[in-house]
């Protein structure tokens, strides 16, 4: 399903590109009120780190910046979301699709090479999401006037009044701001359907939930619209809207000479502590279906978990005593305390308990451990 997207692909269109030797050269040109950058990377963590670097280091009181980028297949969740509630983590592991937590709010989105990401940087005073979306809608109307393109009150962009082709998220700092949005050109919609669904049943949380919407690709309704034409139209419209005269610039977001310290920002975004550990506290209450082949028998158990900072804070497993002695279910719950809410860590923690138990109860305990680990996504 995802194999055709696994190759690397440079986001840049043909045209004049200039090489810059330092960030001062890139961002300190007094003759330009703004700048358009195009990332050469398709690594989500590098691109998100570049967003952070620009927001932290560029004087956005003096100029605006548009960053254009795209990623290999990735699921990106909002700052205050729960990945277990938003993503099909087992399917993502199988397809080698990473999950990334961005610093802005909003909902979960699927990225691949058929999706264009646009990040509009400005001072906090100049923060204007409607103006930014107007750049996108005007660009689309200019290259394909027959398309019915409208920005909504929710700051999405709809095609034909129904299909979402762009979603929005933003982040405001003390003096700066950025607003980023997606634009679906030719994304794999089958992957969206498979990957954007919960991993775990029974999650209760105050985390920001995503709001599902019907989506479409621009290529579905304008098959002749090529990627390079779309990219050029967006750059030209942004330049016209913000009074730019210089060409767009190609940058490598992993270039420490150009973006000093960006590597440490990338490392943080890749870390388990950021991606999963920043999840708002949540609980899991679900029923586990148990079975024993010798003799053939079935039973239900109840699992109750509290998870804080991505780690099991409390755990209770209620199994009928006729199925498994209470001492074993209590030992199982105790073994998970403090562990990451993660099937691999849980399996490792429970393996020691399984080694200590032999005899007729071993198969039932093993089945309980397997079902519990599977419930973690």
Image (cartoon, rainbow, N blue to C red):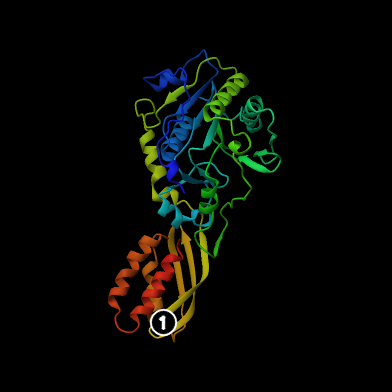
Residue 54 % position (x, y): 47, 30
Tell me if 334 is positioned left or right of 178 in this view.
Answer: left
Tell me if 162 is positioned left or right of 183 in this view.
Answer: right
Residue closest to the far front: 224
Does residue 200 sit above or below 277 in this rendering?
Answer: below
Residue 158 % position (x, y): 67, 39
Q: Quadrant of the C terminus?
A: bottom left
The residue where tag 1 is placed is 326
The residue shown at (37%, 64%) is 346
Between 204 and 83, the one nearer to me in the picture: 83
Look at the image and tell me whether residue 145 can be seen.
Answer: yes
The residue shown at (61%, 45%) is 215
Residue closest to the far top: 31
Q: Quadrant of residue 327?
A: bottom left
Residue 29 % position (x, y): 47, 15
Local crowd size for mark 1, using a 10 Å CA cut-off: few (<14), some (14–19), many (≥20): some
Does residue 259 sit above or below 308 in this rendering?
Answer: above
Between 340 and 172, the one nearer to me in the picture: 340
At mark 1, the secondary structure is helix
Tell me if 118 is positioned left or right of 99 in this view.
Answer: right
């Amino acid at each position: 399903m995802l194999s055709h997207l696994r190759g690397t692909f440079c986001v840049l269109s043909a045209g004049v590109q200039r090489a810059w030797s330092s960030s001062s050269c890139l961002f300190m040109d007094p003759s330009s009120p703004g700048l358009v950058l195009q990332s050469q990377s398709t690594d989500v963590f590098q691109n998100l780190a570049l967003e952070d670097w620009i927001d932290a280091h560029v004087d956005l009181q003096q100029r605006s910046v548009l960053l254009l980028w795209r990623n290999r297949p990735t699921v990106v969740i909002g700052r205050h979301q729960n990945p277990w509630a938003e993503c099909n983590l087992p399917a993502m592991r199988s397809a080698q699709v990473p999950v990334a937590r961005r610093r802005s709010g909003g909902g979960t989105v699927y990225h691949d090479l058929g999706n264009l990401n646009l990040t509009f940087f400005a001072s906090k005073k100049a923060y204007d999401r409607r103006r930014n979306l107007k750049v996108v809608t005007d660009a689309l109307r200019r290259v394909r006037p027959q398309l019915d393109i409208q920005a909504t009150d929710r700051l999405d962009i709809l095609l034909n009044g129904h299909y979402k082709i762009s979603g929005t998220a933003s982040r405001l700092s003390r003096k700066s701001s950025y607003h980023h949005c997606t634009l679906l050109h030719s994304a794999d919609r089958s992957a969206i359907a498979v990957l954007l669904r919960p991993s775990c049943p029974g999650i209760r949380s105050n985390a920001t939930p995503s709001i599902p919407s019907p989506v479409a690709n621009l290529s579905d309704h304008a098959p002749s619209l090529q990627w390079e034409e779309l990219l050029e139209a967006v750059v030209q419209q942004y330049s016209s809207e913000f009074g730019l005269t210089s060409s767009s610039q190609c940058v490598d977001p992993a270039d420490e000479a150009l973006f000093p310290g960006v590597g440490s920002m990338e490392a943080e975004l890749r870390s388990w502590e950021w991606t999963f550990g920043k999840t708002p506290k949540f609980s899991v209450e679900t029923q586990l279906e148990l079975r024993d082949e010798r003799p053939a028998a079935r039973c239900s158990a109840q699992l109750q978990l509290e998870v804080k900072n991505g780690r099991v804070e409390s755990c209770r497993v209620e199994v009928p005593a006729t199925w498994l002695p209470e001492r074993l279910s209590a030992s199982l719950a105790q073994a998970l305390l403090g562990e990451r809410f993660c099937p691999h860590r849980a399996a490792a923690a429970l393996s020691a308990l399984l080694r200590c138990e032999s005899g007729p109860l071993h198969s039932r305990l093993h089945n309980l451990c397997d079902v519990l680990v599977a419930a973690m996504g």
